[in-house]
Image: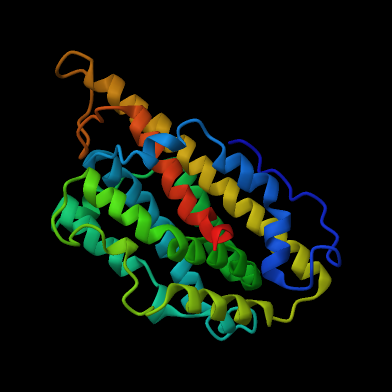
Amino acid sequence: MEPLKSARKVDLQDSGSDLSEQIKAATQETHVRAENTDLMTSFQKGQITRTQYKVLLCSLYEIYTALEEALDRNSSHPAVAPIYFPQELDRTEALERDLEFFLGSQWRSKVIVPAATHRYAQRLREIGKVKPELLVAHAYTRYLGDLSGGQVLGKLAQKAMELEGKDGLAFFSFPGVSSANRFKQLYRSRMNSIELSEEQRREVLQEAVDAFNFNIQVFDDLQKMLSVTSESAEKPKGTSRSTPFPPPSSVQLTVGLCVGLLTVGIGLYNF
């Protein structure tokens, strides 16, 4: 496992008093690193297959399940309560509907995720037990990113996979949010009102950087996992164990999809 890179040193005064602005400053380098990949253009061209999308949904499901269980458990914590919006933001049930659409009623037995996804989920469970205030970093980077880029990515996915209607795309839909822009303003205001010591604030900033790095590691592991699947598919029949996913037509497109959905997590800087 590649070690998580530390947040660059940030002068809390110079970067502003708002936590949202401080997160933006602290994660600037990691944000650029995640965004400036050559394969980003693959997703932007809408080159997505159902196989690639299924694999990503599995990882998103484990990540959001861990995050939302931790938020539910700590809903009354002073650092979590202000940004706790389960009816408006929760993604777990939406992902369950999408997985059932693509994998069938027995989808739970078909979910496969790479090691990086397990590490990410484990981190969310860990801080939920010992330092719930750090959940703020993950909730902010994920949910506001979802709201910022979800509509565009949803349309790209729908067109590329030739889906009719909204079936299979519940992850991108937020029926409890009438105006994404107004809700993001409310969310930032609530988050900026959280009282944190200087040490806690620095830990939240580092956790935001770690959140980006966890996502990048998930992306890398998905690439490796699908590369192995592709190689196995080329072996003579009977030499490899079958998986619930057919071999991808192009691992490059899979990577493009994963990077593209990383922009959901980093899209919060684009509003």
Q: Is residue 59 left or right of residue 243?
A: right
Q: In this view, does 42 lie above or below 214?
A: above
Residue lying furthest top in this view?
236
Q: Which residue is drawn at 48% across and 78% down?
A: 183
Q: Where is residue 160 in the image (x, y as percent from the top left)?
A: 24, 43
Q: Where is residue 33 in the image (x, y as percent from the top left)?
A: 62, 40
| Quadrant of the image occupied by residue 100 | bottom left
Q: Nearer the viewer, residue 251 or 96?
A: 251
Q: Where is residue 209 in the image (x, y as percent from the top left)?
A: 66, 52
Q: Residue at x 46, y 40 (%)?
A: 219
| Quadrant of the image occupied by residue 129 | bottom right
Q: In this view, does 35 lie to the left or right of 41?
A: right
Q: In this view, does 240 lie to the left or right of 258?
A: left
Q: Is residue 181 above or below residue 239?
A: below
Q: Which of 108 and 44 is in front in this view?
A: 44
Q: Residue at x 55, y 42 (%)?
A: 35
Quadrant containing the C terminus is bottom right
Q: What colour scheme does the image use?
A: rainbow
Q: Residue at x 56, y 67 (%)?
A: 140
Quadrant containing the N terminus is top right
Q: How many labels does the image show?
A: 0
Q: Where is residue 252 in the image (x, y as percent from the top left)?
A: 37, 28
